Image: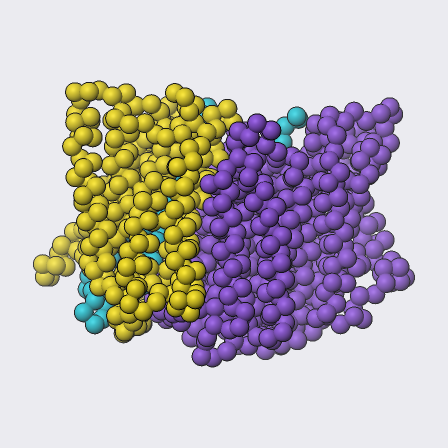
Amino acid sequence: MSALPILIPETTTAGGFLLVLALVLPLASVFAALTLGGRNARRVVMLAIPAGLALAVAIGVELVQSGHTLVYLLGGWAPPLGIALRADGLSVVMLLTTTVVLLAVALFAYSDFQVPENGHEVRAPFMFWTLLLAVWGALNAVFLAGDLFTLYVALELLTFAGVPLVSLEGRSETLQAALRYLLFALLGSVLYMLGAVLLYGTYGTLDIALLAERVRPVPAVIAAAALMTVGLLAKTALFPLHLWLPPAHAGAPAAASAVLSALVVKGSWFLVVRLWFDVMPGVVTPSAAQLLGALGTAAIVVGSVVALRQERLKLLVAYSTVAQIGYLFLMFPLAFGSIGDVPAHGAALTGGLLQVVSHATAKAGMFMAAGLIYAALGHDRIADLAGVARAMPVTVLAFALAGLALMGVVPSGAYLAKKLMLDAADGSGQWWWVVVLQGGAVFTAGYVVLVLVSVLRSRSGSMPLVKPVSRLSELAALGLSTSSLLLAFAALGPVPGDLVSSPLAPKELGTTLAVVLGGALLALGLSRRSLFGAAPVDSAANEGALRRSVVAVGAAFELADRLIRRWQFASIGLLMLVALLGGLLVFGSPG
Amino acid sequence: MNASMLYGMCGSALVGIGLYGLIVNPQPLRKILSFNLIGSGVFLLFGVIARRGAALGMGGDPVPQALVITGIVVAFSATALAVALLLRLQEASGSATLSSPEPADPPDA
Amino acid sequence: MNMPLLVDGSLVVLILAVAIWTIAVRDSFAAVVGYAIYGLMLALAWVRLAAIDAALTEAAIGGGLTGVLLIRAAVRLRPTESVVAVETPGRFVKALAAVLAGTVSAALAVVVLSLPVPAPTLAPEVAGHIASTGLGNAVTAVLLAFRATDTLLEAVVLVFALIAVWSLAPDRLWGGRPGPRYHLEANGMLAYLARLLPPLGIIVAIYVFWVGADLPGGKFQAGTLLAAMWLLAIMAGLTDAPPVSRGWLRVALVTGSAVFLAIGFAGVPLAGAFLAYPAGYAKPLILVIEAASMLSIAVTLALLVLGPPERSAQQ
């Protein structure tokens, strides 16, 4: 993107046709699944997704070999009249991540969503496989389209594919969560559309490359930037616009939650990056970028604390998604901290990208593990998980590895991302983000430790398993978590090797232990129930005053979160954010 | 002030009216109506921009006009999905409200 | 103050008045009727903005089909409306919302009024290239030639929305028929209209589709008309909605996009790019795409209005 040049005048580059295939393959698969119906939907998925993975790899190879952005002019018409598909490093990484995670989810859910032998079409499996392909198609369109209106249509495709995944089981709470998700997402996309309209009115084009050349900080563009950014933040569920996410992701079936948390929210995040880094780098001001970072920090803190207060595993994982989404926005103040500071800019962007990939894989693995526990036990009450580690070791290992990956333990992708962002923070002198980056890991460790302690407790008597766990599903979850943990090694091409030190080096080991210890302290303090017993704090009369006050702080956080997640609060907050962001874009530049 | 400016202000006002309705009305059906108002206001603004781009014998810039048509169809499909969800919610739970006392807990199997 | 400005001014006042009424009125059914009226007046505004294609689409889909959809919903939701109404926020929240919404409106108005003059426009580009498409209607040329991918994706949006709507069916009714069973009142007004209007509607739809190549019109408007005629026949009880598991129905849904994709890929060897048209054959190919899409759009739109399956296939 900023590093890879675009050829002027623009023509279709060699290998550009691969982009068309990447766009069309998932959509054609959806049609095939719809017409063939019944059990063929799963077959179509198992054929199409590996093909898509091969295609993504091919695009990556072509990109690396040619050294510039891949372009395809659809219909032979060049922008501004026509639409172009473009693939740069960011697109390719997202394409690869999407296909890998979807493949893992497909393997995980292989036996869950089966069609009975008599071949009659059954709703939930047919819908699950078709929607999986639909999410894939929408995401590919988001990653490849080079025109703001095409991206709007792609965003709507993503929403229409994600919403029914929430209500797949058909319970009334999930229907309500799906409706709330849909309405808030529609509000986000209509604000995005409004911004695009203003950009067209000012420059007569919606093409990203052309706009990048023409955009200046005039009132219309500032209004567009504020509206589009906040609209996309609503779809990404960044604090305080996260009202729809916890019930939606917790209520969906495990495979669907994995897709929703790992991939669907990344689509709108991707567009924020495109907007800020590609279309409007000259318009965004450092203060506006600090606002995004501040919201991210708030997300990390509030999300983690409320996660610690949860009594259900799936809700805990959903709130951990709220927290992790905050991490995705720490890259913005680091990249735009000092304009023209190219090394910091590049490091922050690479760090953010690594963060996204590691989060996508680790979060999918975590949701899968949580889903397996729920399916096997018949419930997911954290207090009653004793003995699970002995009964389902592979699953617990998957959860633990995912947690370690999220915490940023060497050599996970999150570790490398943190290293890169720390470099950027040091380079631009923003010491406060160093605090956030280091401190955030402790918050993550908190809820991971909480769950691990609960499952590692031994149980007197045997564990009553409602349903045997599929080995394939466990391996899929483990595979994803492991890949997230080892991601730093995969990234060693574009990143210097000396950044990744051995996990057993004293410095790294010390940091890891400190993080885990800090997390354990947090969990001890904030969790509703004692870590080592089952009695909730509120009822125990002889808990110390310190413990009671810490729990009260946690309860206050939870209450605040519940208040913010009411519709009126969140929608008013959304409009206030638009105004705030607009103001910071006008007045925020240094001198 | 010419006609385009008049419709431009109309579109802006519609966006504001829709936003107010979306925030304040508790019934999801009214929220869907408000969303449609905002959407049609945005499209109207696009139409004003198209009109301002009139040239060469065409009454307006055809690109925004074409995009508006696409947008109207997309908005309709969104409305249809939202209405279907709302009706199913009412069928399943007996009430049609967006607010819930607690976040949705996955039930014990 | 001249006459056209007076007309525009009155139209704007009416539109805003109906919009405010739609937001503020207590009864949801009244609000929905207000929205249908709003849609039709908005179509007039589009005519005044010299965007006839958009006016046709707004009247057909925005006011017409959306109105049908919302009226059916409002009737079904009537019992629960008063229960939910108690959640109306207090005066402080309302005032805050009004201030914020008003600020956004005002800022938008200022920004729109300050857009550059002369306005940047793609009309010259369109005029320069439209000859190669063989079309006379610039909007159709944009939709099906220059920005054909948007139109393709938009057909996909319709299918995705329908998949999402169908996913809401209860498990035991999967594969069944959408919508309730409408009883035929053989001598009633509705049955009379349902026998009279569809043949006329089909002819008008074919005309709108055909003439859309050179004059305002096209497949969206025509498809909506066809959908409305089918819905009329279903709602009068003359015919019944097909079960969603029917193979021909599924094929009908994807035919438009399949033809679009096929012609798009054929463009690679024949014209050098995906969705490019070989010289001289652009108009016939576009008409083929439009015809196939019109039928798929008609089926999809009608099914979107009918909703998820509510009866088993045998009923």
The chain that appears yellow in the image is C
Place of residue A179 in the rendered image (x, y in percent of width and height, measured from the top left): 48, 38
Given residues A423 and C142, the one toward you in this image is C142
The picture's colour for chain A is purple
Locate residue A88: give its quadrant.
bottom right
- The residue depicted at 52 percent of the width and 27 percent of the height is C171
On the rendered image, what quadrant is the N terminus of chain A found in? bottom right
Given residues B5 and C36, the one toward you in this image is C36
- Tell how many labels: 0
Whether residue C62 is visible, yes or no, is no
* Placement of A284 over or under A544, stated as above or below: below
- The residue depicted at 53 percent of the width and 29 percent of the height is A120
- The residue depicted at 25 percent of the width and 42 percent of the height is C225
- The residue depicted at 49 percent of the width and 61 percent of the height is A20
Asked whether, in this view, residue A432 is left or right of residue A578, the answer is: right
Place of residue C76 in the rendered image (x, y in percent of width and height, measured from the top left): 36, 26
Whether residue A375 is visible, yes or no, is yes
Place of residue C176 in the rendered image (x, y in percent of width and height, measured from the top left): 43, 27
Colour scheme employed for the rendering of this structure:
by chain
* Placement of C232 over or under A57, stated as above or below: above
Asked whether, in this view, residue A332 is left or right of residue C19, the answer is: right
The picture's colour for chain B is cyan
Asked whether, in this view, residue C207 is left or right of residue A56, the answer is: left
Locate residue A74: give its quadrant.
bottom left
* Residue at the extreme left: C3
* Placement of B63 over or under C154, stated as above or below: below
Asked whether, in this view, residue C299 is left or right of residue A302, the answer is: left
Place of residue B83 in the rendered image (x, y in percent of width and height, measured from the top left): 40, 36
* Residue at the extreme bottom: A8
